[in-house]
Amino acid sequence: MAILVAGATGNVGRHVVGRLVAAGQDVRALTRRPGAAALPPEVRVFEGDLTRPETLPPALEGVRTMLLFPVGEAVDEVVALAVKAGVRRIVVLSSAAVTAGYDTEYHYPVEQAVERSGLEWTHVRPGEFAVNSLYLWAPSIKAERRVVDVDLDTPGTPIHEADIADVAAAALMDDRHAGKAYDLAGPEALTHRDQIAAIAAAIDAPLRVDEVEPDEAREFYRAQGGWAAENADFLFGFEDYSGATTDPGEAAAGADQQEGADHLVGADQQHGEQSADGEAEEQTWEEPDISWLTCTDITGGPARTYAEWARDHVDDFR
């Protein structure tokens, strides 16, 4: 039987497809733009949209396990179709923000819909995506060899999207991962200053680094456009995970904890197959009770460092 990958052309999904093909699996890819998928020839590509469940039955026929990209709209209908088609297990590409208690509106409802279905499930919950720094920093690095950021010495544990894919692929193929929720981090704690240094080494060019206040950073990235502009309020502490207005000073109070502001936004949520995207409420920062794992803990394979990630993306920064 087949494995279906929704979000197959996203940052994580494309790697998942590659892992499954290499393992000799019968792989199907779900995409809204099959003509632009550029996936391996062994992959059967289906046109479909998770927000339009009526497009999914052909892709689901004969599927044993599927990777579900986190799109909350129509998720109950999507999961019901999977049940009807005989899917046995759904692996959800989720977020560590669920474990931390910040995410109750985006990834969490998708997880809950899958669990309610009675199907086997695995939740893959990465924390900070290394690729976030690509969407933040690459435009100014390419244009003027410059990075603008706040709190340069705050540590994080960015994870390579390929590590997330290794775990997701393992969960799709191996029944032993059923009923597990994996909170994933990279193998090393690095400050933003460390990350910028790794990018500079990868492209073999010095980078100017400007540490600024949150309001200046927000305006800079709003002007930059794209993913950075869409997420600037959240990334720099002006908005919480649910979109409520916050004080950047409150966010800074939690910056020395494992979950910094940008640790909870995965680039696939904005740049994959689908978009995942009142009065202010007082925010209380408490250290989340998260047992972080690397892909090594789950697959036994080596966890990729941020320096490796920077080398893998060197052309994106030049």
Image (tube, grey):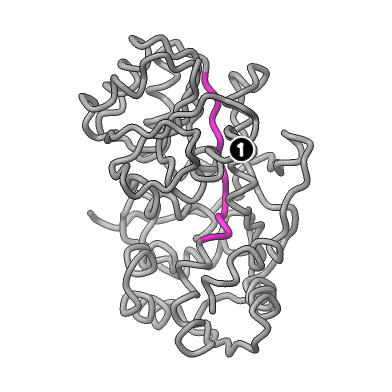
Is 191 a magenta residue? Answer: no
Residue shown at 57% from the left, 75% from the top: 151
Residue shown at 28% from the left, 33% from the top: 48
Q: Give residue 179's quadrant in the image.
A: top right
Residue shown at 76% from the left, 37% from the top: 297
In the displayed structure, does residue 78 sit left or right of residue 11? left
Residue beneath disc 1? 19
Q: Position of residue 27 (x, y in %)?
A: 49, 28
Q: Measured along the vertical axis of the image, is residue 8 above or below residue 144?
A: above
Rendered-image quadrant of the C terminus: bottom right
In the displayed structure, does residue 36 sit left or right of residue 95? left
Residue shown at 50% from the left, 45% from the top: 14
Camera-side residue of 116 and 31? 31
Amino acid type at circle 1 is Arg
Label 1 Cα neighbours within 10 Å, binned few <14 / some 14-19 / many ≥20: some
Camera-side residue of 73 and 10? 10
In magenta, the rendered stretch is 121-131
Q: Measured along the vertical axis of the image, is residue 263 above or below residue 97?
A: below
Assign a secondary structure to mark 1.
Answer: helix
Q: Give residue 172's quadrant in the image.
A: top right
Camera-side residue of 150 and 300? 300
Q: Position of residue 50 (x, y in %)?
A: 29, 33
Q: Position of residue 203 (x, y in %)?
A: 64, 79
Q: Position of residue 225 (x, y in %)?
A: 32, 73
Is 122 a magenta residue? Answer: yes
Q: Give residue 237's quadrant in the image.
A: bottom left
Q: How many marks?
A: 1
Q: Residue furthest front?
A: 41
Camera-side residue of 222 and 87? 87
